[in-house]
Image (cartoon, rainbow, N blue to C red):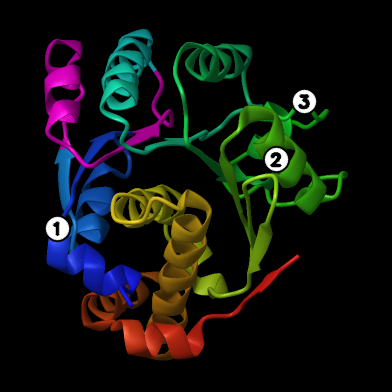
Amino acid sequence: MNLPLGKTRETKPLVHHITNWVTIYDCANITRAFGALPVMAHAPEEAADMTGIASSLVLNIGTLTTELIDSIIIAATAANKKNIPVVLDAVGVGATTFRDDMAAKILNSVRIDIIKGNYSEIAKLAGEDEQTRGVEATSIDADPKQVAMKFAESRSCVVAMTGKEDIISDGRKTYVVKNGHESMGMIVGTGCMAASVIGSFAAVNENYCDAAKDALCYFGIAGELASVRSEGPGTFKLHFYDEVFNLSDEKAQSMMNFEEC
């Protein structure tokens, strides 16, 4: 049985990121700590070539520019041709018209295999009447499991909604992941890092729904372990990387806390 962390560390997939400048360093570090290899190439002139040697592509619209959208579409087109997983982290969708329009442009231009966002971001993409006021918007009026399931079914993709409980659906099966700790919300970038972990696990598991579920379980478990030794956000971040680095499949499998709806 090939377990996700061992397989990732054994195969060392190259994960190409076109991501935001606030958390790019953390995304690179968490990818490496889980055993994959990060690369960040944003220029339109090389986006396709870099994707051509990668095993997965992680896209993030946190620090959005028109040129970034060009690079994202170029890279995702190359990923679609190569048939490698494409993860889109829909950061801030629902906050501005420009951001909403650019997210729609991406979804209408290329195939996205895994769409990740917090509850309000995913609800907005799914057509719900929601407004995003920050990266921690984790409550919506609609039933989040139904939103995730119906949106995943309509897009023929996997949807990963992150919050106090993470919801992952491919339209047929839906998981609720309960791993994690509130300390993870004390530092900037955990959402972006989660997308990197999903991209790393999807690179070695063709079942993208299970890959996303495993990634968010393992990521949350590292947060739980780090919180025990931490006194605040600074020491939490320090211990978080160490817990990821020292995590094993055996330990993670014993601590996974999820249910299938």
Tell me the SS state at disc 2: helix
Are the residues flagged by discs 1 and 3 in contact, CB closer than 8 Å? no
Q: Which quadrant of the view contains residue 34?
A: bottom left
Tell me the SS state at disc 1: loop
Label 1: which residue? 12
Are the residues flagged by discs 1 and 2 in contact, CB closer than 8 Å? no
From where the camera sits, is residue 241 visible?
Answer: no
Label 2: which residue? 120
Q: Amino acid at mark 1?
A: Lys
Q: Residue at x 36, y 75 (%)?
A: 236
Q: Nearer the viewer, residue 58 or 102?
A: 58
Q: Amino acid at mark 3?
A: Gly
Picture disc at residue 127: 3
Q: Residue at x 77, y 50 (%)?
A: 144
- Does the segment drawn in magenta span residue 258? no
Is 182 left, or right, of 148 in this rendering?
A: left
From where the camera sits, is residue 154 visible?
Answer: yes
**Mark 1 to mark 3: distance in Å?**
37 Å
Q: Which region shows up in magenta?
A: 40-64
Q: Nearer the viewer, residue 9 or 31?
A: 9
Q: Amino acid at mark 2?
A: Ser
**Mark 3 to mark 2: distance in Å?**
11 Å
**Where does residue 73 sit, x and y in percent of width and height?**
36, 15
Residues packed near mark 1 inside 10 Å, few (<14), some (14 to 19) or many (20 plus): many
**Where does residue 9 sit, x and y in percent of width and height?**
17, 67
Mark in the foreground, 1 or 3: 1
**Mark 1 to mark 2: distance in Å?**
33 Å
